[in-house]
Amino acid sequence: MSVWSRIANVFRGKRLNHEIDLEIQSHMEEAIANGRDPREARRAFGSTLLYRERSRDVRLFAWMDSLRADAVFGWRQLLKSKVTSVAAILSLALAIGACTSAFRLMDALLLRPLPVANPERLYDLSRQGIGPDGKPQDFDGWAYPDFQLMRAAVQDQAELIAVSYSETGDLTYKSDAEIEKAYLQYVSGWMFSSLGIRPALGRVLTENDDLKPGAHPYAVLSHDYWVHRFGQDPAVIGRTFHMGNDLYEIVGVAEAPFTGTEPGTMVDIFLPTMMHPGVTHKDWTWHRTLALVKPGVAMEPMRQKLEATSLAFEEGRAKGFLGMTQETIDTYLNQKLVLAHAGTGVSDLQSGTRQPLVVLGVLVALVLLIACANVANLMTAQAAARTREMAVRVSIGGGRWRLVQLVLVQGAWLGALAAAIGGLFAWWSGPFVVNRINPPDNPARLLLPADWRVLGFGVVLALGATLLFGLAPALRASAINPVSALKGGENPHSRRRLMHALIAVQVAFCFLVLFVAGLFVATFQRLTHQPIGFSADRLLLLDTVAKLPQPQEVWEQTAEHLRSVPGVEMVAIADQPLLGGSSWNNSISAHGEVPNGVLTYMRAVSPGWLDTMKIPLLDGRDFRLNDVHPGSAIVNQTFANIYYPGERPLGQSFELVMDEGVRLKYQIVGLAGDVRYKNVREPILPQLYVPFRMAAGTKGKSEGVFLVRTSMTNSKALAAALREEVPRARPEFRVSRVRTQMEINQAQTVRERLLATLALFFAVVALILAGIGLYGVMHYSVLLRRREIGIRIAVGAQAGGIARLVTTDVFAMVAVGTLAGLGLGMASGRSIETLFFQVKATDLQMLALPAGAILVGALLAALRPIMQAVRMDPSSMLRTE
Amino acid sequence: MAKPDSLQGSMDLLVLKILSRRPNLHGYAIMTAIQDVSGEVLRVEEGSLYPALHRMEEAGWIRAEWVTKDSGRRARIYELTALGKKQLGLEESRWHAVSLAVNRVLREA
């Protein structure tokens, strides 16, 4: 016999009782067989029940046995009112699941340290200053020559590591016909040894792979890519792939789970920084600089040293900034170098979603609290219905702690079931949300381990929730006064006060959730209805690459060929699509003046591009086939307003001022309508279109986009055909990607859409939960006061009076809650302003909407209890009493 | 846990001793054996014998088994385990020490 048997006996209580009874019975039989009088023997034995109980307690854990009994009892209580139980469990499950899911996302993206040796000593270098637009800016991009100087300057205090912003590359493993995309990150060769990342196969890059520009065509795969792309084939070592004009050799696979330093992007292939085309450029900021600080190093002196080194570099570079005012140069140089902790990695996804995630986390936590309040109210009402039972238990000697345990165990049932369902929900919804953070063709990829951290969070949450909703009713139940309860005269008001307070809290939280959701939905709507200046309907984009630069004639021939494909209306060529995320900008000198510091954004386009995009030509003409870059230019209205206010821009000349003093001369041949260039949030930028065709003597272009306006609404139907038509027209070309302009436009607001959708979802959930809570409390108070209501009806009270009687208290609570929510909303709206677009937390409409929704919800919830009260038949009611 | 009764303390010793001499007794027989051997001086409270037996069984000193006797009645019989033998030695030496001490007090006080 052991601890184990004592636990086992808890679950075979009946058999245990039976066995003890049998033994006592055999004792009696023995006594009678020995000639004793049965009655005397029974008396001599004493209370069989008492001894059975004692024997039983010896042979099992008594506390466990009582727990088991309570669990069985609690389960029966849940089954008794199935609908309310299911509602309570589901609402709690949804809330717990959503909270766990939000935590899982935050943990994976923001909290979890990178899987490297010393994440706590890793920092990201950035510069803070005033941008060319006069606004504060914070940028962590660096030029490689600057990086080399800084690395040498602090080599005794820290190891600096260059890691490029991850990008997608077009590469081919076999023939040129099979282009595939992979995520690339150019990294310092010594990154692997510094961060303690060992090879899983072959070798990782070393310092020796990162010495001479262009001389180290070696690649290391991430473990994840090796598994997905190559099925863990060990023969991958030594294989080669083409990218651009380079042939790379795969030398190894990095150990799992390292997939680069950017949470949200899982890098497939690591390449040495020396292979990046920008590695020798002083003006190309293409990589981040991470610092692995040695233990015990003072940060501030090191920071100053880095800042001084970088400033000296930039000052040397600024001597070549011809044609810029001294003021602009000073502003540019006046930047502070900042070291920020990067133990959890650095990525745009992190900085872009930190605030939205926290806001969503708060929203789901509020929904959880609303659900908890609901369940607490439900259990309080149930406890009220069991007042007599509790009183009987207390009066026959049931300990008060046992009563607390009884109610808590029932709460634990709810909590455990809700946690189990919530866990499933979290397991499903985490990846679901991650896949929707970024546009569909470039989804965020995040390691979402469901390990002890997430599990622990879920369990703690469920326990906390159980205590939160179970404790108040449990304590209340235990504090029962059996005498007054059995007489039926217990004071009902104290219980109602608790429920009313919870209603006010619920309504306040509900208001807050609705309010924030309203702001997000309004933001999303305003963003999607921003005028963009061109038409994205039926516009298909073919990203096209060639191994070698191709002259304009080849591009035009291909476009001409595409025009003959059935279903194609118009075709034009551009270097990049609008709103696609790629920027090309320069300073302008008009009327021979010094550039004003405002950047003009450029696109290289073919004749017919304006028509294809449906951008109005306001003045002058479109490009012709013989227009070249540099030479002719079309500008937009904003450009004209800035440089030629009150003048006709047509025929005017201006110069493009480039780095190192190079100036290109243009003459304006056309004036186009304003369109959005980078981003639908920003004001319209001054824009300049130059011909896709380069001036004689240049090599042509190896990358471009064919813009195809199709005649059918579903332009994607033509995608496969057009992908094949391009190489058929000119074998030099490959289509690396097919997108629609609509997809690009939607990608602009994908986070706002996600935020609005999720917030709206939780707002609906919160409203429903609060409605259920209101209904429950009013229903309960009608039940409680049915005697009073019956008497009032009997003596001639009007229906309106009865309705007022039932609803006054609750609606007062709703009003209090709404006011509190209003205050909370105004206060918190300020702190998340940056997430809004053309919406303010103080807009009357934004405040009126949730208040109205809550009022309607409350009225709907009140309808049935009011009807019940008004339709009460006093004669039958009073007869039963 | 059961409340201590009058024979608590010596009850374990008596039961273990009886079982060491005569294995495979059932509860009633253990009770009568204690009465007989003590010359009717020691009486076991009948009901409280069973919680004590079950406690000792739980402690692993004795083990029990259901048997059908010749008379056709079923009975739960007990025997000592190795652990029980050790416990018996312990209880016996404790009893001797106590009775020695009590005797000394009676003689010398």
Image (cartoon, grey):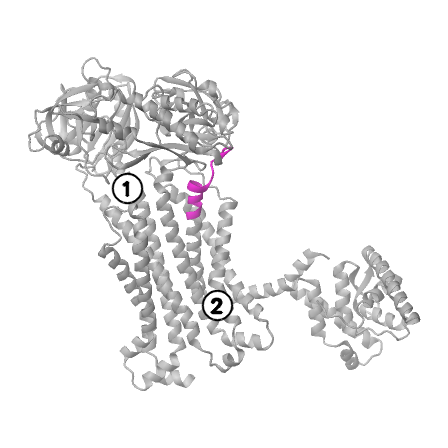
The residue under the point 32% across, 66% down is: A816
Residue A474 in the image: state x and y as whole percent: 51, 67
Instruction: Give the magenta-colored segment's residue range.
Output: A102-118
Q: Is residue A180 visible?
A: no
Residue A572 in the image: state x and y as whole percent: 19, 27
Q: Is residue B57 shown above or below A218?
A: below
Chain under label 2? A
Left or right? Give the position of B100 relative to A26.
right
Does B84 appear in magenta?
no
The residue that disc 2 covers is: A473
- Determine the secondary structure under disc 1: loop
Tell me where residue A605 sits by quadrant.
Answer: top left
Tell me where residue A849 sits by quadrant.
Answer: bottom left
- Determine the secondary structure under disc 2: helix
Q: Quadrant of the N terminus of chain A?
A: bottom right
Q: Is residue A128 visible?
A: yes
Does A116 appear in magenta?
yes
The residue that disc 1 covers is: A749
Q: Amino acid at mark 2?
A: Pro
Q: Is residue A76 shown above or below A681?
A: below
Chain under label 1? A
In the image, farthest residue toward the top? A697
